[in-house]
């Protein structure tokens, strides 16, 4: 890999790691467009699967672990496996850019709806069935391009998760889904020795970015974290739409 390309990749993974440690999500959405400047989108998504898994494990391990908070997420977890398998298959066939546009638009609409109705919540009788659907969508989006974080964030916020439980919930769910992503990429032949080598190497700038991100997150109050999360979701949504349309 040329020196300039390596520098761009390192910065993209570093920045994605900082965002992931700060918010609990956003690694793929922020790092994939940067890596795609010097790599093919499919190759970028494939090598990022390894640091994405590592970052998710790290976020879950670093967060305050409230296991009771995970109980409502059972149906979501059940939906992850079929979603990951479908996404790995679709990665070879679907135009990723239009998937990004659709997800980005959904995220923007959610942020705007929440801005005008801060108490927006999912009715309790819909938590489990919607959770299963979100699980499938999360699995698909993880395999398609590590872009599941914003959709997962919308669901967790809609059932009342706040800072500590939110970060732990996101970390736990993304650990399961990105672990399945790596396994499915290996099975389908997307993740070979070359991709694995670059993916493991990318964990070095990832670690630096995440250490700094965790320090920044620790300085935030719950209110400041929620405000930052919503602002970040809006920007991530805009970024996904822009990248999908203009890439």
Image (tube, rainbow, N blue to C red):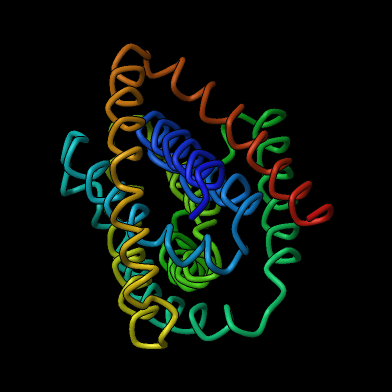
Q: Residue furthest front?
A: 2
Q: Nearer the viewer, residue 16 or 236?
A: 16
Q: Nearer the viewer, residue 37 or 173?
A: 37
Q: Residue at x 28, y 37 (%)?
A: 207
Residue at the right extreme of this rendering? 246
Report the front residue among 197 and 18.
Answer: 197
Residue 98 percent across, percent down from the top left: 76, 65
Q: Is residue 193 left or right of residue 34?
A: left
Which residue appears at 72% of the width and 74% of the height? 95
Residue 155 at what x, y percent from top left?
Answer: 49, 51
Q: Total number of numbered labels? A: 0
Answer whether residue 134 is visible to the viewer in this image: yes
* 67 with respect to 178 (left or right): left
The residue shown at (32%, 22%) is 212
Q: Is residue 18 shown above or below 70? A: above
Residue 229 relative to residue 107: left or right: left
The part of the image, by quadrant, that contains residue 94 is bottom right
Rendered location of residue 101, percent (x, y): 75, 57
Residue 165: x %, y % from top left: 29, 38
Does residue 158 appear in this view? no
In the rendered image, the vertical position of residue 4 relative to residue 246, given as above or below? above
The quadrant in which the C terminus is found is bottom right
């Amino acid at each position: 890999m040329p020196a300039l390309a390596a520098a761009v990749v390192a910065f993209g993974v570093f920045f994605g790691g900082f965002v992931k440690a700060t918010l609990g999500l956003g690694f793929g959405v922020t790092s994939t467009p940067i890596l795609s400047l010097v790599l093919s989108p499919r190759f970028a998504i494939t090598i990022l699967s390894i640091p994405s898994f590592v970052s998710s494990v790290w976020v879950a391990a670093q967060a305050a672990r409230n296991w009771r908070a995970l109980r409502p997420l059972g149906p979501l977890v059940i939906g992850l496996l079929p979603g990951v398998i479908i996404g790995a298959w679709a990665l070879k066939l679907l135009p990723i850019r239009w998937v990004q546009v659709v997800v980005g638009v959904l995220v923007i609409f959610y942020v705007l709806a929440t801005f005008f109705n801060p108490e927006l919540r999912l009715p309790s009788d819909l938590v489990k069935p919607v959770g299963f659907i979100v699980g499938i969508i999360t699995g698909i989006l993880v395999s398609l391009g590590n872009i599941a974080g914003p959709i997962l964030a919308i669901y967790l916020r809609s059932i009342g998760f706040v800072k500590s439980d939110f970060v732990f919930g996101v970390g736990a769910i993304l650990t399961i889904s990105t672990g399945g992503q790596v396994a499915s990429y290996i099975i389908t032949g997307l993740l070979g020795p070359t991709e694995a080598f670059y993916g493991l190497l990318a964990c070095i700038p990832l670690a630096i970015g995440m250490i700094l991100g965790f320090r920044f997150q620790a300085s935030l109050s719950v209110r400041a974290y929620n405000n930052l999360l919503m602002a970040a979701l809006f920007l991530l949504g805009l970024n996904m739409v822009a990248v999908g349309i203009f890439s």
